[in-house]
């Protein structure tokens, strides 16, 4: 089975605002969020999208 169009992970500095079944990575700084998003993008073979200054998601298209 091939997974298409799914949110694989969320990266945030506000853990109380992110819920769901995808993995959630909590970070302390904006720089840490950017680094985690870049690494997960490569590891998960997805695309990182910044939804706000405190939230990224990794999406599989």
Image (spheres, grey):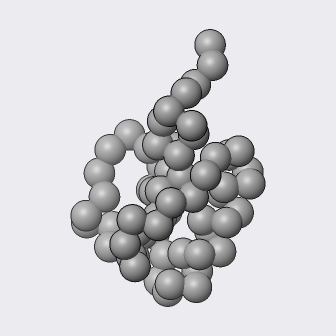
Image quadrant where residue 3 sits = top right
Q: Position of residue 30 (x, y in %)?
A: 50, 84
At 73% from the left and 51% from the top, the residue drawn is 43
At 32% from the left and 44% from the top, the residue drawn is 20
Q: Quadrant of the C terminus?
A: top right
Q: Is residue 7 above or below residue 56?
A: above
Q: Is residue 40 above or below residue 30?
A: above
- 58 or 29, which is in the foreground? 58
Looking at the image, residue 15 sits to the left or right of residue 31; the answer is left
Q: Is residue 37 above or below residue 23?
A: below
Looking at the image, residue 37 sits to the left or right of residue 22; the answer is right
Q: Position of residue 56 (x, y in %)?
A: 47, 64
Q: Quadrant of the N terminus?
A: top right
At 37% from the left and 72% from the top, the residue drawn is 52
The single residue placed furthest to the top in the displayed view is 1
Image quadrant where residue 36 sits = bottom right
At 74% from the left and 54% from the top, the residue drawn is 42
The single residue placed furthest to the left in the displayed view is 17
- 9 or 46, which is in the foreground? 46
Looking at the image, residue 22 sits to the left or right of residue 3; the answer is left
- 40 or 46, which is in the foreground? 46
Q: Position of residue 8 (x, y in %)?
A: 52, 43
């Amino acid at each position: 089975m091939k997974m298409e169009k799914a949110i694989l992970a969320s990266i945030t500095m506000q853990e109380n605002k992110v819920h769901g079944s995808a993995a959630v990575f909590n970070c302390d700084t904006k720089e840490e969020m950017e680094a985690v998003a870049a690494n997960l993008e490569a590891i998960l073979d997805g695309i990182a999208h910044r939804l706000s200054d405190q939230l990224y998601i990794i999406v599989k298209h």
